[in-house]
Image (spheres, grey):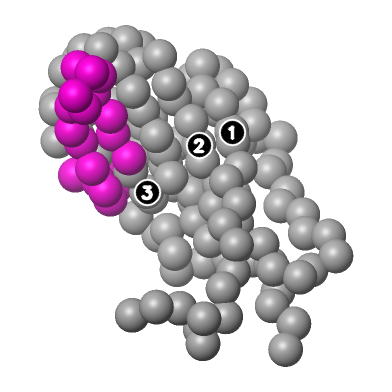
Amino acid sequence: MKLESKYLNTDLDLRSSNNLSKLGIFFEKHAVLLGCQVSEDGMWHIRVEGKSSGSNKDANVDIADLLDAIDKMRSEHKKIWESCDKKEFNIGINCGETWAFSIFINALNVKRVSELGASIIFTTFPIKEESSCVV
């Protein structure tokens, strides 16, 4: 059985030396906050998904959902956003045996991401057959 490649979802990953807890509270209200914590090196990290993440198969919908949430930020949140040295829209892909697999990101989303000083990255994950998974 051939394992097909597929789009998983898009996460927004943020990192800052400043406290991101207020931004975490904002994302709890306007998106799906997956984590907001400080690491051992003192850096703060946030991972968030759009509210519709996982329910569709289109990265553009997930990216636009996150961008729309960011557009709702007040000035206090925008100031915290600007303190982040990492702002990445991380597109997850399960890589199967598909010869080629493409994800189209439309020009409007690319422009909006760029205007925020953010990047788009792709993370690939191997697909493992269920029979080879350890439970």
Q: Residue at x 59, y 36 (%)?
A: 121
Task: Say which quadrant the N terminus sits in.
Answer: bottom right
Q: Earlier in the sequence, mark 3 or mark 1?
A: 3
Amino acid type at mark 1: Ile
Q: Crowding at label 3, few (<14), some or many (≥20) Cα neighbours within 10 Å? A: many
Q: Crowding at label 2, few (<14), some or many (≥20) Cα neighbours within 10 Å? A: many
Span colored in magenta: 28-47
Q: Residue at x 56, y 26 (%)?
A: 119
Checking the image for residue 89, the label placed there is 2
Say above or below: 2 vs 91: below
Return the residue nearer the eye: 64 or 4: 4
Which of the 4 image quadrants contains residue 74? top left
Q: Residue 12: within the magenta?
A: no
Dot 1 lies on which element? Answer: strand
| Residue 92 percent coordinates (x, y) | 54, 52
Q: Residue at x 50, y 36 (%)?
A: 89
Amino acid type at mark 3: Glu
From mark 3 to mark 1, how far is it between C-alphas? 14 Å
